[in-house]
Image (tube, grey):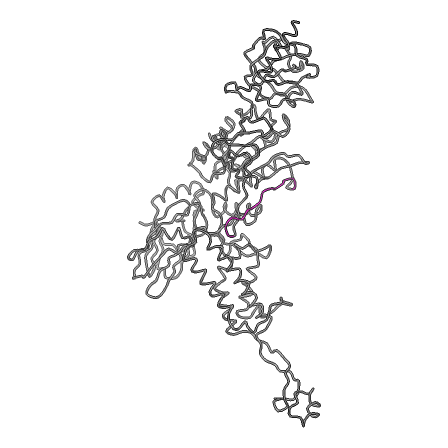
Amino acid sequence: MDLLTIQHEDFTMFVDCTKFDDIWNKAKSNVGEKDLLSTYTWSEGVVSVERNGEPIAKGEKAPAVFFDNAEYPVWVDFKKPVAKAQFGSMLQSDNERFTFRGHTLAGFINYGNDIGKSELNIVYQTGTESKRFTFGYEVLSTKLNYHEHWKKIIEDIEQEYRMLSFDYLRRTFHGFTPDEKGDTPELIWWNVFAKEQERFVKACKSIIERPRRRLRGYEVFLRADILKRVPANIENELAEHRKEPAHLYRVEEHVQSNDTQENRFLKYALGQILEKYESLKKRIEALNGVAEIEKEKMQKMLDTLKHLQRNPFFRTVGRFKGLNQESLVLQRASGYSQVYRTWNLLRRAYSLKDGVYRLQSKDIATLYEIWCFIEVSHIVREQLGITPEDVEHRNRMEMNGVFTWELGKGEHSRILFRKNGVELAELVYNPKHTTWENDRTGIKNLVVPTVPQKPDIVLQLSKDDVQKGMKMTYLFDAKYRIDGKVNGVDSPPDDAINQMHRYRDAIYYKDNKEGDAALKKEVIGGYILFPGDGEPADVQVANFYKTIEQVNIGAFPLRPKDIDNRELLVQFIESLIGKTSTEILDDSIPQKGLYYTHDEPKDSVYMILTLDEEVNKDVDAVLEGRASTIIMGRKGMEETKDIQSVRYIAPIIPGGHIKGYYKVVKANLAHVDNKIYPIRIRFDVAEWQVLKQPAKFGMAKWAFRGVCKTREEFFKLCSEQAVIDKI
C-alpha cells in the first residue's frame, strides 16, 4: 500500500517512503504523536486522497506524511494522453529530478532541513489546454515541534535581528500577515505582490476600460454663430458687437476628463510597481537554481505590466502630486479599491502572525544554530548581571543573495559584555580559525597550524585575577541532530562530541608580542548544544553530561520553551563566570594550564628566583634541594615574560648564593594568605642539580622577583661568579 494516493480526474498520484515507519517513530519519540499533524489542501479535480488507505478531508488535519531529511518517490500516472508534463517547483534542481515518459511523470523529493508549508505542483497539457495541479501540506521536523518550537525560534531571532530568519528559493514557506509598522523589505514586497499580482492586473484593466471621469472646464474663444448658449456674463458684449460676425467671445466649456486624482494615482502606482518588479526579477534570475518555468512566469507578468503602462489611456493623465485628502473613489470604487489595497500592502512591514502571504525561512539547522548563539548571549548577560545597554554589539547582518541576510562571522559577529567600562566577556559566532593570525574572520591570537576549524560559538571570559587581560576560551557547537534515546534521554551525535575533542586539540594560542612565537594550548572546554529532551535529573546522570566535569567535553540539551534543561546550561555558565582562574585551571585538564610533557627545547629558560619566606615556609629545604614545591613571590608574575618557558629554577635569598637548580615538572596557580597578592604561581619541582661552585648574584634590587636567563647566560653567570668568589 502506498503512503499517499491521490485520485484525480486526469491522473493518479502515488507518494511513498521506504523508511517511513522509522521516521514516524523517531518523530513520535522526539515530538509526540499529537503534534504530528498536517493540514492538506488541493486544487480542483480531485476525486479522493488517502494516507495508508485512510481517507483525508480537504482543509482538515490528518497525520503527517512529509518530514525533513527523508526521500519520497513520486509517480503520476495520467489517465488521458498528455502532450507534456513536468514538476512545477521554482527550484530547477527539483524539476530535474522528475522525468516524463509515455503517460508517467516520476521522480523524488527530499526537503533536507527545510520545514514548513509546501506544495506538490504538477504542470501538464491535455490537447491545447495547459493545466496545473497543486497539493498542499506541511513538512514537519522529526526533532522539534514545528507548530510550537519553530515559531519560538523565529520570534527570538527576529527580535534580535529583524529579517535574518528569512530566505528565498527554499522548498517550504510560512504564512505571514502585512503589518502597519516599519519598512517593507524587498523580500516581503516580492512575496506580497506574488499573491496580489493577478488581482492588481485585473483591477488596472477594469479601470482602463471603465475609468472614473470628471467634468473639467476650460476657456475657448468662439464666434457668436457657434455659441450653443449665451452665458449671462457676455450678453452686453454680444449686443455691443452684434454687427461684427468675426468677433470672438471668451466662454467656458465642460468636457469629461480622465485626468483625475485617482487616475493619476493609478498611473503612478503602476509605474512604481513595474520598476520594482523588473529590478527584482533581474536579480532573481541571476541566482543559481531558479527553474525555467518560474522565469517564464515572471517574464509573462513583466510583459503584462509593461503593456498596461503603454496603454493610450495614460496619455491624457497627468503627473501624480499626492493625495490632499481621503478619496472615496480609491477606497470604495470598483478596481480603484483593489489597486489602493495592493499599494498599501506593498508599503507595510510584516507580522509573524499566520496569514495568506508566503514567506520562506532559512533551513531549521541554520535557524537553530543562530538561536543557540542568541540564547548563549542572553545567558551570559544575565549571569554577568549587566543590562542590555552594557552589551556592545559589534555584530552585523550582511546581504546574501538578492534580498536575504546572514549573520556576519568572526570579527563581524562579536558581542562584548562590559561593566563600568571593564570587559568581562565576549562572544563570537562562526569564527574560522586558520594558519593566518590576522584572518579577519577569526579571533585575535588564536591559530590553527593544520586545517581550518570553525566552531559555531566561541565564548571568552576575561579573568584579571592572575594576569591582566587573560581570557578563558570555551567552544559551543549547535547540532540539529539527535542520535536516539538512552534511559529516556535524547543523546547527541557521537561524531559531534568527537569534533569538540578535535577543536580543543587543534586550536592554539599565540602571543604576537615580539620574540614570542611559541604556541600554547588555548581551548579549555567544548560543548555540544542539541535539541534533545529528557528530565533534568536523568540528563545529569547521562554520560554526555557527566563528561563535562571529567574532561570539559560534553553536551547540553537546549530547545525552545524547555526552561528546566536550559537551567543546566545557565548553571554551568554561571559557574564559569564565578570561578577564579585558579579554580578553572585546577578543575580542567591543563591547556593554558602550564603543563610540560615534551622534551626540553633549545631555548629553555633558567629562572633565578628570590624566595619569599612568607609563602615558602621551609626556605632551607628549598635552598638545599629537598623541596617539591616552590611558590613565586608577589611581583614575579607581573615581571616574568612567559612562565611557560621556564624549565629550571635556581632559588636564592637576598645576599645569598645560588647553590643549584631544580627541573620544573609542572606550573599552576595557587591561593596564598595575602590580601594584596593572593594569587601566586606554584612550581612543582624535582631533580635537584648542585652547582660545582656556589655562585653569587646581586639580588638587592631583585627582591621577590624572578630573573630569567637562557641556559648559556645562566651557566656563564655561575662560572664568572665562581671565579670572582675565589679571588
* Vertical order, 311 against 481 (above or below): below
Front residue of 575/292: it is 292
Give the total of numbered labels.
0
Percent coordinates x, y for residue 89 in the rendering:
41, 54
Quadrant for residue 514, please give it.
Answer: top right
Which residue is depicted at the point 31% across and 61% down?
A: 82
State the quadrant of the C terminus.
Answer: top right
Quadrant for residue 415, please give it.
Answer: top right
Percent coordinates x, y for residue 361 in the rendering:
49, 49
* Vertical order, 420 against 77 (above or below): above
Front residue of 177/62: it is 177
Front residue of 195/11: it is 195
Point out the stretch of residues depicted in magenta.
389-402
Percent coordinates x, y for residue 121 in the rendering:
39, 56
Check if residue 709 falls in the magenta segment.
no
In this view, the residue farthest toward the left is 102
Front residue of 467/578: it is 467
Percent coordinates x, y for residue 194 in the rendering:
48, 59
Quadrant for residue 632, please give it.
Answer: top right
In this view, the residue farthest toward the top is 726
Check if residue 401 falls in the magenta segment.
yes
